[in-house]
Image (cartoon, helix red, strand yellow):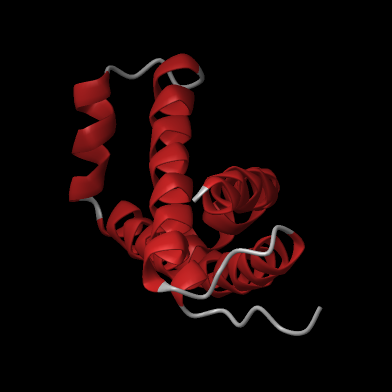
Amino acid sequence: MGRALRAGCVYFGLVFVAGFALGTVRAFWLTPALGHVGAVVVELPVIIAISAIAARWSVRRLAVPGGVAPRAAMGTLAFALLMAAELALSVFLFDRTPAEHWDTYGRLAAQLGLVGQVVYGLLPLFVARGRG
């Protein structure tokens, strides 16, 4: 299980960095042009593709077994870390209370983002380990 947990941390780190960069692009360029929902709709397939690549790479690099339990542990840890990081950024960067952060999920753009985050958490279950 140790490999799966290390892979979950690596997977989180890779996707978090990519998501932070894409979030910057979304906030400064896409949202003004397309609105919140339009920007998320454009960003979502890109971050899911990046997540799939990062999940496969993490699984292969750290030799995570193909069973459901290790892959689910990897995805669950990565998802939990992502949600915690998102909450921390919301509180410390955007000066929201935790309650205000959770209230953002009442908006369609945040709901679409949450769907993407759930897909991100599930991806380790579906990526192939490949050769080597």
Observer-nearest residue: 63 or 89?
A: 63
Which residue appears farthest toward the right when viewing the image? Answer: 132
Image quadrant assignment for residue 33 = bottom right
Task: List x then y, in percent, for residue 63.
Answer: 68, 64
Q: Residue at x 68, y 60 (%)?
A: 58
Observer-nearest residue: 100 or 4?
A: 4
Observer-nearest residue: 83 or 67?
A: 67
Observer-nearest residue: 43 or 85?
A: 85
Q: Residue at x 26, y 22 (%)?
A: 98
Task: List x then y, in percent, for residue 40.
Answer: 47, 62
Image quadrant assignment for residue 84 = top left
Q: How many marks?
A: 0
Q: Is residue 95 left or right of residue 51?
A: left
Considering only vertical position in the picture, is 54 above or below 67? above
Q: Residue at x 33, y 52 (%)?
A: 110
Considering only vertical position in the picture, is 89 above or below 69? above
Q: Is residue 109 left or right of residue 62?
A: left
Answer whether residue 19 is visible to the viewer in this image: no
Considering only vertical position in the picture, is 89 above or below 109? above
Task: List x then y, in percent, for residue 6.
Answer: 61, 44
Q: Residue at x 48, y 80 (%)?
A: 126
Answer whether residue 14 is visible to the viewer in this image: yes
Q: Is residue 45 left or right of residue 68?
A: right
Considering only vertical position in the picture, is 35 above or below 124? above
Image quadrant assignment for residue 57 = bottom right
> What quarter of the picture does the C terminus occupy?
bottom right
